[in-house]
């Protein structure tokens, strides 16, 4: 769940992490926001996997 929260935070407030850590700001914040999006999307996949549903079997049944 922390990946989803971190990704949402980076997407909505990309400069906060740099200001909070004292690092120099990035010039292209859309690159940093893209990293947040990738991490957030991975968390959705983790949650789907952890739910225990067999999605491959569900897909196979609906295509027959």
Image: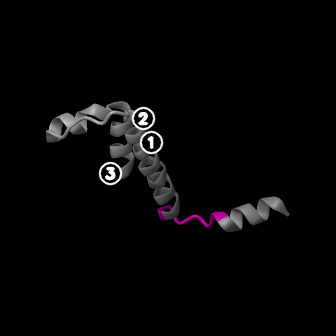
Distance from disc 3 to disc 1, alpha carbons, whole Å, reads 17 Å
Instruction: State left or right for residue 44 relative to residue 18.
Output: right
The one of 48 and 18 positioned closer to us in this rendering: 18
How packed is label 1: few (under 14 Cα within 10 Å), some, or many (20 or more)?
some
**Residue 22 at what x, y percent from top left?**
14, 39
Query: Which quarter of the picture shows residue 9?
Result: top left
Which range is magenta?
50-55
Residue at 82% in and 60% down:
63
Residue at 44% in and 53% down:
43
Distance from disc 2 to disc 1, alpha carbons, whole Å, reads 6 Å
* Residue that label 2 marks: 30
Distance from disc 2 to disc 3, alpha carbons, whole Å, reads 21 Å
Q: Residue 11 colored magenta?
A: no
Secondary structure under tag 2 reads helix
Residue at 47% in and 54% down:
42
Q: The C terminus is located in which quarter?
A: bottom right
Nearer mark to the viewer, of 3 and 1: 1
* Residue that label 3 marks: 2
Q: Which mark is residue 19?
A: none
Q: Is residue 57 visible?
A: yes
Dot 2 and dot 3 residues touching (CB under 8 Å): no
Residue at 58% in and 64% down:
53
Dot 2 and dot 1 residues touching (CB under 8 Å): yes
**Residue 38 at what x, y percent from top left?**
46, 49
- Decide: is 44 above or below 53: above
Secondary structure under tag 1 reads helix
* Residue that label 1 marks: 34
Q: Residue 53 colored magenta?
A: yes
How packed is label 3: few (under 14 Cα within 10 Å), some, or many (20 or more)?
few
Query: Which quarter of the picture shows residue 60?
Result: bottom right
């Amino acid at each position: 769940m922390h990946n989803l929260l971190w990704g949402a935070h980076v997407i909505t407030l990309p400069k906060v992490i740099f200001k909070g850590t004292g690092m120099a700001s990035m010039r292209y914040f859309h690159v940093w926001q893209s990293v947040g999006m990738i991490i957030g999307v991975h968390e959705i996949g983790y949650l789907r996997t952890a739910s225990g549903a067999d999605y491959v079997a569900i897909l196979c049944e609906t295509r027959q």
